Image (tube, coloured by chain):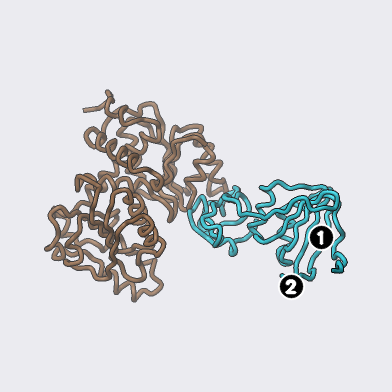
Chain colours: A brown, B cyan
Amino acid sequence: MDNRSLITLAEHSREKLLYLIEMAQEFEKHPNRRLLEGRIAATLFFEPSTRTRLSFETAANRLGAKVIGFADPKVTSGTKGEILKDTIKMVSNYADIIIMRHYLEGAAKYASEVTRIPILNAGDGANQHPSQTMLDLYTIYQSQGTLENLNIYLVGDLKYGRTVHSLLTAMRHFNPTFHFIAPDELAMPEHYKQYCKDNGIKYHEYKEFDADVISGADILYMTRVQKERFSDLMEYERVKDAYLLKKDMLVKARPNMKILHPLPRVNEIEYSIDDTPYAYYFQQAQNGLYARQALISDALGITLEDVRNDKTIIG
Amino acid sequence: MKRQELQVAALRSGTVIDHIPSDKLFQVVSLLHLDKMETPVTIGYNLKSGKMGSKAIVKVSDKFFTDEELNQLAVITPNVTLCIIRDYEVVEKKEVTLPETLIGLVKCSNPMCICNHEPMATRFHVVDSEKRVVKCSYCNHEMALEKMQII
């Protein structure tokens, strides 16, 4: 079916990624517009995710679109046994775009096959979360002035963390060097390492996490080590603190180094780091707004040129 | 050389599918919808085979399957022998090749995949036809065809 759905960034070309970054830059300059006036965006969250939903809804609202939808699947007919296809078809009669989060993998792809309106994947189980990847790319670009030839350090849960996997895939166009820092239990899966080899992406692996290891970093991407991933809780207690970023570990950091985290953080970054110039995770979260404004606009067929020539800017 | 008596009667016209492993016979029957066929179908089961020990054979009268239909057999049993018969003569021999895309044939082994929760056709792309590895179009998991359940 011919539509402008966004299910994954994995197939986007280098040009398309840079194009979306440029569009997000325009929205960063002027986030408040009436560009989407008269349009309706539906946010269907079959799995609650307050952070992602607020970010998408703010993005749509600041562009003048109206937002309908649900934040909690308990209020929908899904609990009465309605299938996903029927929900999507019903909402397609009302909205111009569906932004959906689902606990099942492939749900967004399937939804895009049963409707003519664009689907924006806001996370489908352990599979894809392209708007997170887009805001990560935008943040890296914004903080470093380029996406090319960077040393990107990924720390924590590299086994289950879909954000690090998507980032790895999207960065393949930009000649990165990746550094994987994780305990054995949460190490980068073999097939992603193979993916790196197949795509000529350089990578190094470490178990220790200290000032020397991270001294070469341009980007230090922290992830949450989730307790529920461990079968042995003793093991969790042992590793959780080993991957805590402390302020004194930044003594050898490069001046341009920035710390990212998809948030929420629990026990990964010492709070005292928040006031250092390296902390960039709140800026990263804010960039979610601009990145999502770009993704929504693109899905609705609005071009970069349209955004540049936009006369509806407010204030 | 003295010709042995045929274990299953010869076919005048139609399709012969030979060298089916006996334990796959009923899957072949259901995949090709032989139970819905209106022309005569002869099925030999647990026949002796020099190469295979035990095999099955299916002879379908006056039926010529499309390549697409026959290639689905590769999902179950890649090494069958296919003969097209006209006037008791073999006019064509065919091999089955695994199609690039498998639609509605096998079940995704990822319990968290949408296709196990919605009334929808499954879809897989073959990523390695030699090792028989396929990838689900929905959840992107890769899996070995041998371990998957036929629908």
* Mark 2, residue position: B53
- Would you place residue B70 above or below residue A20 in this image? below
Left or right: B75 in relation to A54: right
Gap in angstroms between the C-alphas marked 1 and 2: 17 Å
Q: Quadrant of the N terminus of chain B?
A: bottom right
Q: Which residue is mark 1?
A: B43
The mark found on residue A180 in the picture is none
Q: Specify the amino acid type for callout 1.
A: Ile
Task: Specify the farthest residue to the bottom.
Answer: A234
Q: Mark 1 — on which chain does it sit?
A: B
Residue A32 appears in which quarter of the rendering?
top left
Residue A150, above or below A25: below
x and y percent of residue A223 in the render?
30, 59
Q: Amino acid at mark 2?
A: Gly
x, y percentage for residue A46? 46, 48
Please tell me in which quadrant of the rendered image residue B82 appears: bottom right
Q: Nearer the viewer, residue B148 or B21?
A: B21
Q: Secondary structure at mark 2?
A: strand
Q: Residue at x 43, y 56 (%)?
A: A126
Mark 2: few/some/many CA within 10 Å (<14, 14-19, 20+): few
